Image: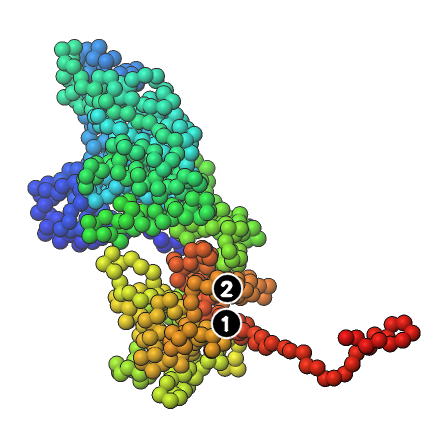
Amino acid sequence: MYKQTLYKILDNHIKPKVLKRLNRYSKWEYGYNKEHDVVVISKTGQVGEIYEIQNLKIALPKETNVHKFEKDKWEKTEYPKALNRIKTVFDWKEYPEDFKEKWFEYIDEEFKRREEGFWFYNKGKATYLTGTHYMYLQWSKIDVGPPDFREANRLFFIFWEACKADVRCYGMCYLKNRRSGFSFMASGEIVNLASISSDSRYGILSKTGPDAKKMFTDKVVPISVNYPFFFKPIQDGMDRPKTELAYRVPASKFTRRKIELGTESTELQGLDTTIDWKNTGDNSYDGEKLKLLVHDESGKWEKPNNILNNWRVTKTTLRLGSKIIGKCMMGSTSNALDKGGRNFKKLYDDSDVTKRNRNGQTSSGLYSLFIPMEWNYEGYIDSYGIPVFDTPTTEVTGPQGGFIDIGVVEYWENEVEGLKNDQDGLNEFYRQFPRTTKHAFRDESKSSLFNLTKIYQQIDFNEDSNNKAIISKGNFLWENGIKDSRVIFAPNTQGRFLITWIPESHMQNRYIEKNGVKYPGNEHMGAFGCDPYDISGTVDKRGSNGSLHGLTKFSMENAPPDHFFLEYIARPQTAEIFFEDVLMACVFYGMPILAENNKPRLLYHFKRRGYRGFAMNRPDKFWVKLSVTEKEIGGIPNSSEDIKQAHAAAIESYIETKVGFNGDGYGDVYFQRTLEDWASFDINNRTTHDASISSGLALMACNKNRYAPVSRRKREAVDLGIKKYDNKGIVSKIIK
């Protein structure tokens, strides 16, 4: 049974006494509540359940006035025929007062729902819609008519409301699947906000200018046109404009009081608000001030356009000094990494709400949201808007009728199975319909330096076989805390080391001591590769990780051959902790280490502690050719082009023979971070690929003989005093 959920309800996050007291006096204010670390989206002054969606804590309004539809599920309320004939507020003014009096309560209620949201029973459960979501369901017209209620969209709008309420936030970065309805939801929101705002600007961007225009003409304008008269400002220009929707002529945010005052002697205030679109480019909307920027298809910006550059510019249009005055609603599936996906991935990763600066903002300023495809896949949502995850055992119908006879998870797995022999097709399917963020950012096999087909085969195999059962997590420690004694491995769910194999007890902590220097006792079994760092963690926590990989050789010992048995990718609080971690791993396994020496503190640490014998020298040079520093501490430089090529070739060869499906079965590389790093490896930009560096060095260390230099002795001719003759012709002649 499918058990994943998009949210959890936090019980007692706010002390019950505090919650009851503040609710009694309606003291909860809309926005971020620092004391309780929660974003309040309630506009009633009262708070009910606390949702946590993608690590963001959101306080919903207190349940009240729950509406019950006849069928116990969402139903669009029919617009009264008497009002349907009224197209503008000016038409309304012509009607007699007794007619108007009949409809004031109805209009007031619609304004209240727009502002505070709406409660209704869905399958017997009280369910909350934000005001924006209510406007989308009740008053927005999309290509298939009125939108369906979907639980996934309800959570999307709750998260979006929190983004609007949070003063620290510039908006959302939404990673989605195809046909999730984002473009229509964003179009509904831009019309909803623009039609109640004065002197404001609203903008639309997409992967190309024509795409932005199409969204404007096919989605935004029809939604605006179909608003009821009491929500619709009078617009300037054509009924269905192509470039700009302008609410410029007299109109205002209507309320009952406004409508009552709307007599001939009362002049209505104009909104002076516009919605438009721009061509795609880094400087789109530069210099303008926006209340809302809709950023559609952000993961598909291809060169020369760059979503990162554009966001750096457009971000300034949403603030005035340090104050955020506008929001961005960004959503997209992802292209392949070299077709705009990499930039979007960085933007998404930089929007993690758990990683904030001292101003409380994420690196991008946005909040990331990912909804897996199974939550919002058309055709696999029942009449109550709930996803049909598992294949039904009883009759289940969809929103438009018709039976759903297979679960969306089974359907997805069948599609994946059918694409197993078409890796690029499979990767495209993953990107379009992702169940994880890793699926969403799958790359094309032809764009990778290494065999991406095999790498992804291994990744998928690991996920299917639950490789967590194979991997142990923990730390290495000196026994009884006594350094340079015996190293032990201590399992710890929060540990920095991932391991899949430990040598037998008699093979642990083996070393040979010569002249006070310790040498590894298990060099014949394997070796380590390491990409170190020298400086302890910075204030902003930037900097690459330290990376260590352990690899076995073929040996007569009881050890899996050619197997990556250890992965360490971490940046502890101090560099010294990292140095000691690496040292203890080498001592425990009794294996040497080949480390990059451009950051030499790790190797000096080994030497000072008496373990210089564990530090391998570069295998591509004779001892006499090593530099003074290389003789002193060992290691290998990262600047040599020959080394770079040899390093990449070592990984390439290993992937071809040991990773993915190889006829008899799958490889045994169980470290997903390493596989993913190989998948995105760029030989011209190696600094961000710590795992690739250390794993490649481990391969070079275990196969050092392949890189050994060839002795080139100069050969000189020796005269033995023997004459040579040319025997052509009748008489032989001496060759001089």
Which element type, helix, strand or loop, lies under badge 2?
Answer: helix
- At a point 20% along the width and 52% down the height, the residue shown is 358
- Quadrant of the image containing the N terminus: bottom left
Q: Is residue 381 left or right of residue 79?
A: right
**Amino acid at dot 1:** Asp
Q: Is residue 673 above or below residue 259?
A: below
Residue bearing mark 1? 620
Which element type, helix, strand or loop, lies under badge 1?
Answer: loop
Q: Is residue 611 above or below residue 532?
A: below
Residue 723, given in percent of the width and then of the height, sits at: 78, 81
Q: Quadrant of residue 599?
A: bottom left
Q: CA distance from mark 1 to mark 2?
A: 10 Å
Q: Is residue 26 left or right of residue 535?
A: left
**Amino acid at dot 2:** Asp
Residue bearing mark 2? 642
- Quadrant of the image containing the C terminus: bottom right
Residue 353, given in percent of the width and then of the height, sits at: 27, 50
Local packing at callout 1 (Cα closer than 10 Å; few below 14, some 14-19, many 20+) is some
Residue 198, given in percent of the width and then of the height, sits at: 21, 26
The answer to whether marks 1 and 2 mark residues whose Cβ atoms lie closer than 8 Å is: yes
